[in-house]
Amino acid sequence: MILLQLPEDVLYHILSYLDYKSLSRLSQVCKSIYRFVNRDAVWRRIAKEFLNTGISRDGTDIYPHIPLKERVKIAQNWYNGVCKRAIPLKWKTQLLPWLQLEGDVLFLSQAADIRAYHLRQDSGRLQRNPFEIYSGHNGDVCHFVLTDSHLISGGSEGKILVHSRTSDMSVELSGHNQEVNCLDSKDGLIISGSRDRTTRIWTLTSTYPRHTIPMYDRVWSVAISPTLRLECVCSLGSEFRRGAGVLDMVFESPFQLFTCGYDTFIRLWDLRINPQKCVMEWEEPHDSALYCIQTDGNHMIASGSSYYGVVRLWDKRQTECLQFFQLSSDPVSSPVYCLRFSSTHLYAALATALHLLDFRQNPIYIR
């Protein structure tokens, strides 16, 4: 009996013992084996062990339209730091930009406006002109979030704007009297944190807050868990100076929360156990504050540092930094205020430019 005459479930079981190099060699035997070996089911187990392949820890596939074999190829470039750099957008005034990435659209705040750009499929660069501009703030946009139906932004004047993504309608939420540093929104619920030392809870249909929670310091970061439980972090505790708080936080599951901030650590918290002690931590080696983080839902974390535009890639299975990229070559140092990545590209917003890392280079291990 030749190999392809075996039942498919038996063949899948045999192939599950092979690593990616062996699968690549096997796919070169003949066209029939090539077609079988290239199936996503063959590569799924391997893809789950690599960085940023779109397979989350619970098995969800984030990028089902991209073949898994292609994603495993690109994952090796993420691991080895192989990428092409570009600066698709610059501006003259120093800003505190924020980013959101949704499919092939990048949303970027610049001063009082938020601009939406289509991304070129061939290079990941921005189209020359934005196809949508969201405006209405009297000061700079400090933070914004996306939902399926709305874009919600907080400004330095203390105003929150809820923009409809299907029409020109926008609603103003009034309540904060200082800049709105952070926002989150899920299932019609909005939470905001401000320099005025309050956290406020709103709904998409309200113009005034439903609840106001006094805090003992400015609120730098807020998040709503997938179970709609509110988490709000404004300070790391009495052992740190006032204001030395958490700058970004990301839920990876209803019970797992990642945070980063002024104390130079990325920390993983499990909300089911002792809330005073983190489960794991990763230390920024150059003693820089960490302004932002994003995870791939599985093994990779990307972080942005406060000095010289340093972006770091981390593998959660080890404590040392995996790769780092210094994006700023200017004499004046700039933090990475926000970063977002897809399976192929990473975008980082600095004070005067948007930087792009393209990891779609020629694979060296898989054919």
Image (cartoon, rainbow, N blue to C red):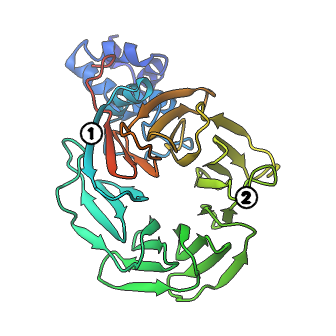
If the image is split into quadrants, where does the C terminus sit? top left
Quarter of the figure that contains the N terminus: top left
Reading the image, the residue beneath label 1 is 86
Residue 113: % across, % down: 33, 70
Q: Residue at x 37, y 26 (%)?
A: 77
Of residues 267 and 304, which is closer to you in this image? 304
Compared to residue 21, the image places residue 201 above or below, namely below
Residue 163: x and y in percent read 38, 78
In this view, 331 is above or below 35: below
Q: In this figure, which residue is indicated by the disc labeled 2?
A: 242
Q: Quadrant of residue 69?
A: top left
How many marks can you see?
Answer: 2
Instruction: Tell me which numbered mark, 1 or 2, is placed earlier along the sequence.
Output: 1
Q: Amino acid at mark 1?
A: Ala
Say which element carries label 2: loop
Residue depicted at 32% across the width and 11% down the height: 2
Could you classify mark 2 by the number of other residues whose Cα lies within 10 Å: few (under 14), some (14-19), or many (20 or more)? Answer: some
Could you tell me the amino acid type at mark 2? Arg
